[in-house]
Image: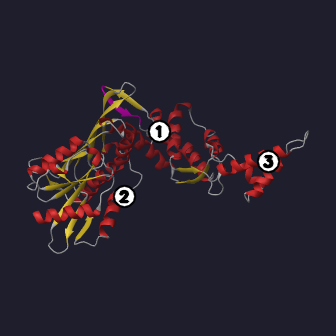
């Protein structure tokens, strides 16, 4: 992601407009980008400090200074920098200081301290080469980190990535986002909604008729906690939108030190391109739950959910995370897991369930949201399961059997 000092925008009439790269700018910057990429490709194993010096020597127009810094940031995000696998600088320094202390105490009056002898003894004790002692002594300092790997890409892909990163940087400061979609086939629509849930975004999905849907998403600046982490999830969700053909995004953003309220508009005509066509799957915690649930060897079979359930008396819909099918009776029960959801969002869902559903649903809610399992009665169309840190397969199974018996 781009940091705030690297995001180039214009403000006009209460609207934010990122300064995307023009065709002329892309052509001018292409040799610069190729030079930066080439340095990283041939610098595996080099120190961070040396690597940054090489990148600094790449020439660019003064007016492109902020753009080039942004491009460098995106390239460094694709690098793995760290300690070499061999050696432990902390252990090495401890042994080196110990040997130096022993040599110092053993010195005869008037004798000189033999630095190389200390290094040689340390190398012998730790079964190292003498030359490696000095190179690894401070290997854990930031400038001494080594480039371990680099996920390469071509110049065109990086320039595309830069424009997307500008839009993502704006969304990091959003209070609310609305995206209107149209012309999506059912498979792509389900993938998109699954991506919303995969990233744990607070959302509301409303059918608009003629196959169109609107997704309203709470922005990170609408929350009282976890702002940065949630903002990153929203930014990472944007490529899922870019892969669609007909969409329009409108966001309210708090911009600058004064957090001035601005609007940000983006649609498919802008031509921003996602770097890959990968579709978000099931969240890791849900994948783990499915594996643990299967080990119970119960009469229920669990799979990822992609069905769209209409909420009674509302325009909104519900897209559960998991679906449970009973192997013998054919009974079907859904589960919706709440991640970053606020208490207000939970209560909205509870009220929806009280009005009725076409199918029974278990609401899995984290304990930190402070919602009681008693708010839904036996007459309601769902069951609430409050968990501490991770969902328990056994607890979910108990609720499945309870709901099935009630049905």
Q: How many marks?
A: 3
Query: Magenta segment range?
Result: 13-19
Q: How far, Cα to Cα, is label 3 from label 1?
A: 66 Å
Q: Quadrant of residue 53?
A: top right
**Percent position (x, y) of residue 4?**
44, 34
- Residue, disc 2: 284
Q: How far, Cα to Cα, is label 1 from label 2?
A: 43 Å
Mark 2 falls on what kind of element?
A: helix
Depicted 404 relative to depicted 230: above or below: below
Which residue is nearer to you in this view: 307 or 366? 366
Which residue is nearer to you in this view: 397 or 45? 397
Q: Is residue 92 left or right of residue 297?
A: right
Which residue is nearer to you in this view: 28 or 395? 395
Query: Mark on residue 24?
Result: 1
Q: Residue at x 21, y 41 (%)?
A: 344
Q: Residue at x 35, y 43 (%)?
A: 230
Mark 1 or mark 2: which comes first in sequence? Answer: 1
- Residue, disc 3: 102
Q: Residue at x 60, y 51 (%)?
A: 147
Q: Residues within 10 Å of mark 2 (few under 14, many from 20)?
A: few
Mark 2 or mark 3: which comes first in sequence? Answer: 3
Q: Is residue 159 left or right of residue 346?
A: right
């Amino acid at each position: 992601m781009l940091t705030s000092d690297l995001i180039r925008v214009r403000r006009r009439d209460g609207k934010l407009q990122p300064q995307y790269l023009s065709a002329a700018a892309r052509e001018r910057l292409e040799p610069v980008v190729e030079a930066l990429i080439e340095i990283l490709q041939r610098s595996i194993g080099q120190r961070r400090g040396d690597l940054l010096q090489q990148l600094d020597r790449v020439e660019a127009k003064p007016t492109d200074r902020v753009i080039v810094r942004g491009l460098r940031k995106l390239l460094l995000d694709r690098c793995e920098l760290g300690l070499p696998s061999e050696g432990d600088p902390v252990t090495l320094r401890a042994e080196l200081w110990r040997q130096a202390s022993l040599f110092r105490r053993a010195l005869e009056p008037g004798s000189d301290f033999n630095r190389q002898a200390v290094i040689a003894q340390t190398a012998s004790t730790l079964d190292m080469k003498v030359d490696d002692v000095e190179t690894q002594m401070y290997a854990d300092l930031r400038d001494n980190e080594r480039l371990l790997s680099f996920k390469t890409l071509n110049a065109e892909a990086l320039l595309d990535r830069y424009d997307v990163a500008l839009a993502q940087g704006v969304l990091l400061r959003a209070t609310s986002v609305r995206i209107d979609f149209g012309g999506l086939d059912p498979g792509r629509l389900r993938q998109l909604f699954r991506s919303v849930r995969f990233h744990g975004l607070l959302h509301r999905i409303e059918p608009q008729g003629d196959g169109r849907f609107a997704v309203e998403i709470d922005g990170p600046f609408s929350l009282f906690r976890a702002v940065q982490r949630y903002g990153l999830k929203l930014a990472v969700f944007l490529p899922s939108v870019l892969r669609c053909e007909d969409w329009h995004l409108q966001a309210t953003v708090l911009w600058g030190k004064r957090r001035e309220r601005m609007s940000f508009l983006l649609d498919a005509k802008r031509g921003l391109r996602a770097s890959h066509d990968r579709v978000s799957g099931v969240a890791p915690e849900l994948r783990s739950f499915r594996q643990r649930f299967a080990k119970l060897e119960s009469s229920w079979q669990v799979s990822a959910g992609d069905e769209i359930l209409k909420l009674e008396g509302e325009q909104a819909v519900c897209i559960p995370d998991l679906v449970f099918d009973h192997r013998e009776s054919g009974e079907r029960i859904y589960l919706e897991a709440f991640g970053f959801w606020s208490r207000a969002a939970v209560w909205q869902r509870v009220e929806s369930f009280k009005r009725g559903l076409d199918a029974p649903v278990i609401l899995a809610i984290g304990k930190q949201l402070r919602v009681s399992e008693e708010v839904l009665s036996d007459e309601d169309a769902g069951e609430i399961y409050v968990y501490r840190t991770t969902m328990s397969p056994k607890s979910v199974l108990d609720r499945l059997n309870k709901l099935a018996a009630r049905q």
